[in-house]
Amino acid sequence: MKTYVSSEYDVIVVGAGHAGCEAALASARLGMKTLVVTIGLDMVAFMPCNPSVGGPAKGTVVREIDALGGEMGRNIDKTYIQMRMLNTSKGPAVRALRAQADKNAYHEKMKETIESTPNLTLRQAIVDELVVEDGKCRGVITNTGAKYLAKSVVLTTGTAARGKIFIGELSYSAGPNNTTPAMKLSENLEELGFKLRRFKTGTPPRVNANTIDFSKTEEEPGDKTPRHFSYESSDLDYLRDQISCWMTYTNENTHAVIRENLDRAPMFSGLIKGVGPRYCPSIEDKVVRFADKNRHQIFLEPEGRKTREYYVGDFSTSMPEEVQLKMLHTISGLEKVEMMRPGYAIEYDVIEPWQLRHTLETKNVENLFTAGQMNGTSGYEEAAGQGLVAGINAALKAQNKPGFTLGRDEAYIGVLIDDLVTKGTNEPYRLLTSRAEYRLILRHDNADMRLTEKGHELGLINEQRYHEFLAKKQAIKDLAEELKTVRVTASDDVQVYLVAKGLSPLAETCKANAFLKRPGITIDMIEELTHHKFDYDRYVKEQVEIITKYDGYIKKQEIEIARLKRQEAKRIPKDLDYDQIAGLATEARQKFAKIRPETLAQAERISGVNPADLAILSVYLQNGRYELKNNE
């Protein structure tokens, strides 16, 4: 096909899902002339699976995106229909905010934001090929022959890359939600030397709310206390007329239908070759893997205010359409339900993420960045976090500026990217709180304290918001000091109050900050007992309560972080020949050569590398047998 140069940009983003939107907006807001190319304009920030944002670890990522100046938190705060804080009975490290989105409103509001952002052009096209010269990406070529040139390119193809949908015995090429797939770009990546693999994910059927008997299900309402993802959102704008979700369960009849039709399930018949997500299995996979369980919970979740479609959560399936309907009719409340869309599985190509740097630039081709599900992750939030980092770095690269990275001690986004780059993944990667060593530091409530400074330095946080952040930071410090000046006496009134609350009596008079460390005690309770008014908002009080109560644990993690930073400071040359290091185990040598760790700390996290291998590498570097160049 004859190609022609259409126009030139600083940054081109391929794909406008959650990763692509964040990448494009970050680049444009950093002053770069940016083009975002998507297969379909109706798929901008679309939610082909669960219409929700947040949850354990994921909710913290959304807050981190917002603290750095990204868009996902602002967008969901404008378009949610329900907001809930999860795990409120547990510690602060695992509390998680989750919002049910109005699916169409979320897409429309994000598309409106992109269309109204200076420096940003949105265009519908299919990218077939990259323009690569002398090992550097120079642009993209579309299926119509248009050539767009740029200084940096970000690929965020999601599940569209050679996408293939499965419903029972039926299979056909398609992207998510029956959109057009991208068939040629994967071939081009393979020609450029990239290692790809096939992953699989799925989605459940959608049903008509008019045919659900909600009286047979359990209501899951939203929170009355104002909640937000974005630090810019106001309590005054909190939605009062929220829409409830509902919970029901599968039963033995459901499981019997599934078992009777396993030979027609693509996962078990051999049709699907891609690896599926361990932490989000299909309902047929659950029934087989957890044969001892006689039921599994199912969530019925509204897809928006202007639709009667309900998402059947935790019921992902690729069974034949008629079997899906039969399965649904066995469930309490769904006996007469009408299915509006069947569930399906989708296979797609991903790039092996160990081929990336922490900036998400590829090692094979300079100026080329990748983000989102094409890096092997699952989830809108993981995609958006990567997209933000990739977009920032594409913009910085276009300006010949140093790259931007986040450490494991700084953000869940840092944990996510480091896991991908250092360990790779054999299945769709889902971020969990257990993956973070420092999760008491990386809390949902303090994302602004951790990352707003970085967002401001990058130029993504404006001056007004930055000054508000500084004021909050000072207020936290002031309240912590003020608590040291107030005393709680061991009076009869105090003892009666504590006993009435089911708490232990106070042995002696103490300072309020020490009293606050006791289980069950809050700053509001101290105000009631001492008649001293602490004039700070609830977000400042929350911060001070957490850092006071968990002071000892936080200090232990800070000691570990200091050790990590010493290891991160020990850089490893990019072109180090590991075959020249005597004593390294064969497995360690092979993995070091494959992943090319950038620091000693990253080398330590590579699976299969034992302490002896690490010690040999450390001594080799310390002995000065290989001098680091200035640019390394």
Image (cartoon, rainbow, N blue to C red):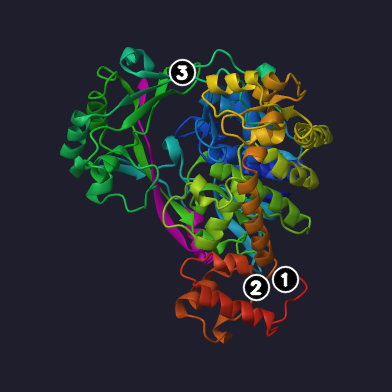
| Foreground residue among 492 and 111 | 492
> Residue drawn 25% across and 19% down?
335
Q: Are marks 2 and 3 in contact (CB under 8 Å)?
A: no
The local crowd at label 3, few if under 14, some if 14 to 19, many if 20 or more residues have their Cα within 10 Å, is some
Where is 130 relative to 331, above or below? below
Q: Earlier in the sequence, mark 3 or mark 1?
A: 3
Q: Determine which residue is flagged by label 3.
A: 244
Q: Are marks 2 and 1 in contact (CB under 8 Å)?
A: yes
Q: Amino acid at mark 3?
A: Ser
User: Which quadrant of the view contains residue 402?
Assistant: bottom right
Q: Position of residue 240 (x, y in %)?
A: 58, 14
In space, the residues marked 3 and 1 are separated at their CA atoms by 54 Å
Q: Is residue 609 found inside the magenta-colored segment of the image?
A: no
Q: Is residue 204 found inside the magenta-colored segment of the image?
A: yes
Q: Amino acid at mark 1?
A: Glu
Q: Earlier in the sequence, mark 2 or mark 1?
A: 2
Q: Determine which residue is flagged by label 2.
A: 574
Specify the label residue 614 is tagged with: none
In space, the residues marked 2 and 3 are separated at their CA atoms by 53 Å
Where is 466 relative to 152, above or below? above
Q: Secondary structure at mark 2?
A: loop
The local crowd at label 2, few if under 14, some if 14 to 19, many if 20 or more residues have their Cα within 10 Å, is some
| Foreground residue among 479 and 366 | 479
Q: Position of residue 586 (x, y in %)?
A: 46, 80
> Residue drawn 27% across and 26% down?
328
Q: Which portion, as a residue range, is magenta?
A: 184-208
Q: Amino acid at mark 2?
A: Lys
Q: Position of residue 106 (x, y in %)?
A: 57, 27
Q: Determine which residue is flagged by label 1.
A: 632
